[in-house]
Image (cartoon, rainbow, N blue to C red):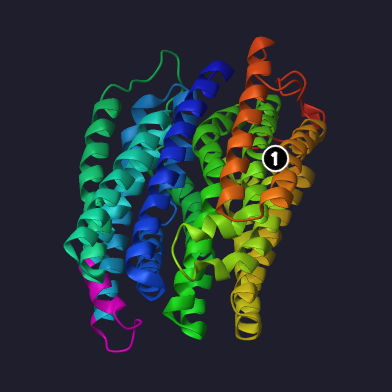
Amino acid sequence: MTPQRLARSGTLTFAFVVTGAGLAFAATLVVSNTSGAAAAGQFFQVVAVLAIATTLSTFGADTGLVRSVPALTARGQGAAVPAVLRIAGRPVLVLAAGVAATAAVLALAPGALPDGVGPAVLLAAPFLVLGAVLNLAFGALRGLHRVPTFSFLQNVVLPSLRVLGVLGVVLAGGGLLALTAAWTVPVAVVCVLALVLLHRIVRDLRDEPGAAPPPDTGTQRRAFWSFSSARGVTAVVEALLEWLDVLLVAAFLGPAAAGVYGVVNRCIRVGAMLDHTARIVTGPSISAALAVDDLATARSVFTRTTAVLVAGAWPFYLTLLLFGPGVLAFFGDGFASGYPAMLVIAAAMLLAVSAGGVQSLLLMAGRSRWQLMNKSTALAVAVALNLWLIPQWGLVGAATAWAASVLTDTGLALFQCVRLLGISPRWSVVGAIAAAAAVLSGGSGLLVRAALGPGTTGLLVHLGLTGVLVAVAAAVLVLRQRSAVRGTEAAACGPKRPRSSRPLLWSR
């Protein structure tokens, strides 16, 4: 994919991801304002169980498709894509059915799940299979460079249906079971749409003239699951890292505290939309570059990704740091008590996002086992610190454990990318953008907070001022006709080490 197409795809995908984040934020607002902290805590527990179960059901096969499909098409072996889809799909269907059955048994077992959560999990269990199939379809669409299509389905269609369902349940006075149905039924609708689109794309794939034949099915299966199985364990660990603290807060402090912490969690996760966008947009391009050992292009994409992440995420996290009470006030009474926890994790995310798309780079370089080691270490840190700090510090203890796990994971991945793979962004570019974001958003935010305070008024003024500053900066770039950040071209980001001294990344 050319830089121009990558930029267009990234822009469109980012717009869809922003829309999805806004819709997810709206769903959280509706639940928290109409149900209260305790009921919101129960709902977040159900969402947590469903997220972990769906991730386990997919077992990394979606990421395996993101990596393997573009590598095949880059080599002109498009006709081999359906075979890879079958290799991915059959084990996932069996595993998903087993996970759904296990979830149903746990839901029926007395005391196995928190009070009120069991019936909701039982209702959602059949949709776990459809959720796993949907994840596979999404992975295939991404691998076929249909990233905007995938993003539109995932970030616009699916959350829109969920928000409409949640609103309907709230207006009808429904409880947790009805909310769970509103959250899971849209998965079936989007799954059908994704499969229809994928079928139309795959049936037109052909081998290019002169392309070498792909490996036999047995070799492909071993290679695919060697990578995907490690990624599957990693994905489950990631899901645990995302939701473990919410579940432990509920266990130690009760559902009301879990509701407050769940809102903080959702607010912080909105900032992860940029990293999510970067992964889904640049992953296939990095995979294709590394498949032909084009390290310069891989490093160029990595530099641009890091620059965009810092430029977009720093203003967001600085806003949470300075105006967290104003943000939490939108969710209703009692949620402002989560501001100290928000301070801790927002500060950590400023550092984590500065490392750029290291997770995507590791995966597309085939280092799923490295990532598994990183995530497992981070999970061990999270579990130990949560068990130690939540009883002592409450929500701040959970946030401290979260921050420590995030920085552990990011630090290990950054070291591996820079020192072991030899791929790093141009830090001069990243540093300049970080400084600009800190001055424009952080500096102006400090002045607004000093004048108007950290509440809703200060937040709205800050957002308006930040929007103006961002628009001015964008206009300057457009007027100077600079579509990319200087220093991010492939020529400028060439390999850090001589090519002759390094084996192919893809083959290692």
**Would residue 112 be counted in the magenta stretch?**
yes
266 lies left or right of 464: left
What is the quadrant of residue 46 in the picture? bottom left
Please give the range of residues in magenta: 108-123
Q: Nearer the viewer, residue 81 or 280?
A: 280
Query: In the rendering, at what x and y percent does residue 193 appear?
Result: 23, 38
Q: Residue farthest to the bottom?
A: 110
Task: Identify the residue at image location x=36%, y=60%.
Answer: 54
276 lies left or right of 390: left
Query: In the rendering, at what x and y percent does residue 318 appear?
Result: 67, 48
Q: Which residue is mark 1?
A: 441
Task: Identify the residue at image location x=32%, y=64%.
Answer: 34
Task: Identify the residue at image location x=51%, y=49%.
Answer: 270
Q: Nearer the viewer, residue 213 or 441?
A: 441
Task: Identify the residue at image location x=25%, y=49%.
Answer: 164
Few, some or many residues within 10 Å of mark 1 (<14, 14–19, 20+): many
Above or below, 327 relative to 390: above
* Residue 258 in view, yes or no: yes
Query: In the rendering, at what x and y percent does residue 197 appear?
Result: 26, 31
